[in-house]
Amino acid sequence: MQLARRWAEEPETNRRKAIDLARQALEAGENDPGILTNTAFVLAQFGEDIGAMIGLVDRALAINPSYAGGWFVSGMLRVWAGQSDLAIEHLETALRLSPREHMGTARGVIGMADFFNRRFDEAAPKLLLSIQDEPGFPPTYRTLAACYAHMGRLDEARAIVARLRAITPLVVSSDLPFRKPEDRELFLSGLRLAAGEPE
């Protein structure tokens, strides 16, 4: 989380340490759904094969099909893999199993899935609700700014970028978790437009 939120003072050292700890955890708890899920999330965040990481989460859910956290991470990884419709199903399952946990983040990831499906009118209200629930989470601001930009609502897009800059100086990130090139391009083109940067 320190790396994801840009709090780490030595990013590369912390990245290596996070990967090493995730692999150690996997060796120690290969049949623990929480360890499988958290390991998959960490390693996917740092660029490991997304299909293999989805496989770890699927294994966790086979062990405990009622594990809301597993369904949540499965949904997030599937957004990163470009499987937006399946991601929405998994995130909705997580919300049904644990309606109070991850509410804001789950809405935001569902909004992100809608964004990648180019359902901008459906994505924007979910992303706004997510920001209300979790006002300090930069990825949701980035997605909403890109969404507004693609909708042609540039004033609102720029207002969201201004709010994002109050949280982090990094508006356009180069280390995105999205594996499909067309998803990355959709996200980056909208965000650059919102930030007033050249395409």
Image (tube, rainbow, N blue to C red):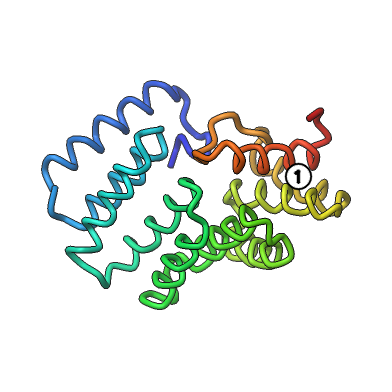
Count of marks, rendered view? 1
- Residue 55 is situated, as x and y percent measured from the top left of the image, at 27, 49
Please say if 164 is above or below 103: above
- Residue 71 is situated, as x and y percent measured from the top left of the image, at 36, 63
Q: On the picture, is 12 further left or further right than 154? A: left
- Quadrant for residue 189, please give it: top right
- Residue 98 is situated, as x and y percent measured from the top left of the image, at 38, 74
Q: Residues within 10 Å of mark 1 (few under 14, many from 20)?
A: many
Q: Name the residue under label 1.
A: 161
Q: Nearer the viewer, residue 169 or 125?
A: 125
Q: Which residue is drawn at 46% across and 34% down?
A: 3
Q: In which quarter of the image is the N terminus?
A: top left
Please say if 147 is above or below 130: above
Q: On the picture, is 46 further left or further right than 59? A: right
Q: In which quarter of the image is the C terminus?
A: top right
- Quadrant for residue 112, please give it: bottom right
Q: Which residue is drawn at 71% across and 62% down?
A: 124
Q: Residue at x 50, y 48 (%)?
A: 82
Q: On the picture, is 21 further left or further right than 3? A: left
- Residue 53 is situated, as x and y percent measured from the top left of the image, at 31, 44
Q: Which amino acid does label 1 sit on?
A: Val
Please say if 97 is above or below 90: below
Q: Which residue is drawn at 45% across and 54% down?
A: 76
Query: What secondary structure is found at the residue carrying circle 1?
Result: helix
